[in-house]
Amino acid sequence: MIDHRDKNHPKWVMGVLGLMLAVIVGIWGLNLYYFKEVETSLLNQTYRDLKQENDKVLSYLQGLTEAKLEWLELFAAYCDLPDGSGAETWGELAEDYNKKGSRVALADLNGTIYYGNHKSRNISDHTYYQKVLEGKENVSRLFPGEFEGQDGIVLAVPIIREGQVKGAALMEYTVTELESYLNNVRLSPYGMNLIFTQSGELLASNPGMDQYGTIFEQLKNMEYRDGQSLEKMRKLVESGQAGYLVYYENNNKRLLYFQPSGIEDWMVASLVEIEGYESMLHRIRELTIGFITSSTVMLVCAVLLIFCILHWRQIEEKRVQKDYLTGVYTRETAGRLVAQGLRGVGNNRFYACMFLDIDDFKKINDTFGHHKGDLVLIEVGQILSACTRHEDVIVRFGGDEFCIWLYGMRGRKQPEAIAGKILSAFNVSGNIHASIGITLVGEHETDYDAILKRADVALYQAKRKGKNQYAVNFL
């Protein structure tokens, strides 16, 4: 049934609320998607930056090694052969390299190595020396403590005369010296560079890592998440492949990138604590949540404002539609509502029309004044509203005349019962008597004026019968 008196739109309201909810969910979804994309982009950028820095370290190490080997080859080409006599002049050529942290030496075919300070020792069983005798220049690690108690690196090139190897030219420098070279490559304040072998043995590291024999020992107690593991890194390193490792130390996220150096089986690694990344991500997360919250609040406020405006308009429209004195519909508004209701079918249309006129209303105005007449009209509107249903349309047709359109009624008895109820209520009030004319609406009838005319005729039939009663005018 249609509620003509207090018309609302629950489906429309639910639709708007559903749309608002969908927009809010959409805002949250899009912003969360945006946040995840930013997070992924930042992490990928961190990966790229770390690899770029590691490439710089690798390029620096390779360039440094190549430069030293080139100088060593030149030195081997012009030095006199070592014989242990002490009369050799090659020491003067190597003087610039014989400083704290590095030194140049020559080795003869017997495996005896001679230093510029006239010291010597035997290296015949060392792998790098055996490779040199085969005519191969190489870079290797010295035995632990072999550089005056320190660990070191050695570069070796063959001394060739007349197409034959006559000895070896060597340049040794400490691991500390190598580490100082690596530190010349500036990463973030939280980064460090490492060199280790494919077996994990640390060649060059940072202070605090000396206690570990291998990089795997250092990393075994770290926390790994999201499919990361030390075992995966170990397999990549042992096969000489590059890769990343993400781990957590004391809940601080760290990122390690490693790749082959091209020198022996050395791997060059760069490590960074992703503090800047985490800080930026936290800031973006705060901004995202703030944007989502503010957007949601503004959207809710906007929707509430729209509802308030629509509600105010609805009240205003109803105020215009209703008679200012009695609170029932005006004649013009009723005409539109009834015309729409007459186009329905079955029970979804108006079935009866009642025309009502207050008996001797002019006498009330003349005797008690117009204020009393207004009070009577107000009471009439209240009684008619109480005796009918919400879907029925009550109209102040003009002056003391009222019209009631009954919705979905069937047969003569229901309209007559409502008319009797109205007359009884008037009589109980003691102030009002009225005459009512009733007509039934045909099943396919849509002529508004013709229906009103029949109800009006029935009204005057009731008047002629003595007033304070109803009469029915059939089709």
Image (cartoon, rainbow, N blue to C red):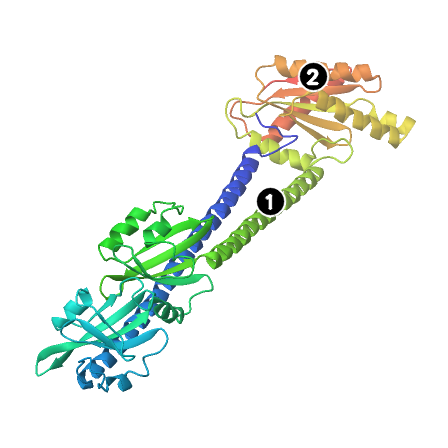
Side of 81 where 57 appears, left or right: right
Q: On screen, 112 above or below 231?
A: below
Q: Crowding near pointer 1: few (<14 within 10 Å), some, many (20+)? A: some
* Residue indicated by mark 2: 419
Side of 257 where 417 appears, left or right: right
Q: On screen, 367 above or below 196?
A: above
Residue lying at the far front of the rendered structure: 85
**Residue 135 image position (x, y, % from top left):** 12, 73
Quadrant location, the N terminus: top right
- Determine the image quadrant of residue 169: bottom left
**Residue 146 image position (x, y, % from top left):** 29, 66
Side of 175 where 187 appears, left or right: right
* Residue indicated by mark 1: 300
Q: Secondary structure at mark 1?
A: helix
- Determine the image quadrant of residue 206: bottom left
Residue found at x 71% / y 38%: 319
Q: Crowding near pointer 2: few (<14 within 10 Å), some, many (20+)? A: many
